[in-house]
Image: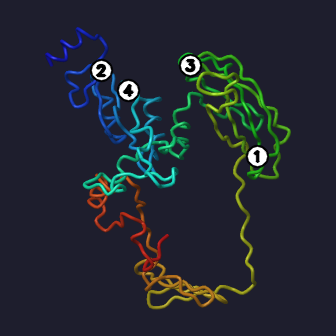
Amino acid sequence: RGRLRRGACADPRPIHYEGKNDVADIDSRMYPSIESMIEQDRQDRDKPYFLCEYAHAMGNAIGNLEEYWDYIENRSVRMIGGCIWDWVDQGLCKYGELPTNYYYGGGFGDAPNDNNFCCNGIVTPDRQVTPKLLEVKKVYQYLRLHADDPASGRICIENRYAFLDLDNFCLHWTLLRDGLPVAEGDTDLPSAAPGSTATLTLPYADRVGDDGEYFVNLSVRLRRPCVWADAGHEVASEQLAVTDRRLPGAVQPRTDEPLRISSEEGRLTLAATGFRMEMDLTRGIVTSLRYAGRELIHAGAGFELNWYRSIDNDKRTYRPTVCALRPDAEVTWEAAGDGRSVC
């Protein structure tokens, strides 16, 4: 504590020291669950709260980033953000190999090694875009686009920038009917100071009918070039429903042949030409499903819902946790193999 105070005399910037919150100027935590983050944020303390490391980006990751930021931006008491670990996959090229191939621990005959634990970035080693980067961009965007009266073309844009006015941007919109574009246009955005909201009406109302399901795609772009991007670069996007979802019509049977239904000795059977299904009424599972003479259920075991899908992060800390919570869980979906009917 004394060393920290002496350092503060020489450098007045706030001190962050994860694990030593009592002597630091900022409370921080690494990798809390959302529930734990909320609990710590609501503690009666007079310091800002910072996630110095969270959202480990190894493999297929960043999946619940939106839930963290929904709380941080809209309901938090002390929070000032967090740091994703990390920016770029730290893969290396090999002499004599293709320059597009990247290697990690063990790829150079090195032992011991940390395997792919260095590949945890939101971009690849050569800085290519990944789905993780797109997810981060979407969650972090500073403009929020909401439907006011979408059928008439009226939308709201909330400016969450700290310094930029909304008139620094323009909007490209595309009206979709059943997934296909039917109209599009561009418009400059009105002035709206940071922290305020603007409402505008897009001219597509006369193109909306009752002949399909309509959505509008919104893309907010830079009006002018800046030091980090050209004019036209997209900074925020959204898709808004314009009409209510159209429910599909009833499926018409291909034949007038009635479905034969029988029940005996705890077993329910449904059958028609080329089709037969049997269900165990005691266990509530489908024990047989035959189409065109082919059995689709393995060993009468029924459909087995493999509830968990493994990601790279499970290979370490989280795998024992999953197994402890669900001892019979198949942590990797590949483990289901050919001997199970998985849905």
Amino acid type shown at disc 4: Met
Residue 173 location in percent, x, y?
A: 74, 36
Q: Earlier in the sequence, mark 4 or mark 2?
A: 2
Q: Residues within 10 Å of mark 4 (few under 14, many from 20)?
A: many
Residue occupying the point 39% across, 31% down: 82
* Left or right of residue 225: residue 3: left
Instruction: Tell me the SS state at disc 3.
Output: loop
Residue 92 location in percent, x, y?
A: 42, 47
Q: Earlier in the sequence, mark 2 or mark 3?
A: 2
Numbered mark located on residue 93 in the image: none
Residue occupying the point 25% across, 54% down: 112
* Left or right of residue 254: residue 13: left
Asked whether the beta carbons under mark 4 and mark 3 sit within 8 Å of each other, the answer is no
Q: Earlier in the sequence, mark 1 or mark 4?
A: 4
Amino acid type shown at disc 3: Gly
| Residue under numbered circle 4 | 79
Q: Earlier in the sequence, mark 4 or mark 3?
A: 4
Residue closer to the observer: 171 or 130: 130
State the separation of the CA atoms marked 2 and 1.
Answer: 48 Å
Numbered mark located on residue 176 in the image: 1
Instruction: Tell me the SS state at disc 4.
Output: strand
State the separation of the CA atoms marked 4 and 3.
Answer: 18 Å
| Residue lying at the far left of the rendered structure | 2
* Left or right of residue 79: residue 341: right
Residue closer to the observer: 234 or 129: 129
Instruction: Tell me the SS state at disc 1.
Output: strand
| Residue under numbered circle 3 | 195
**Colour scheme shown:** rainbow
| Residue under numbered circle 2 | 47
Amino acid type shown at disc 1: Leu
State the separation of the CA atoms marked 4 and 2.
Answer: 9 Å
Residue 256 location in percent, x, y?
A: 75, 84
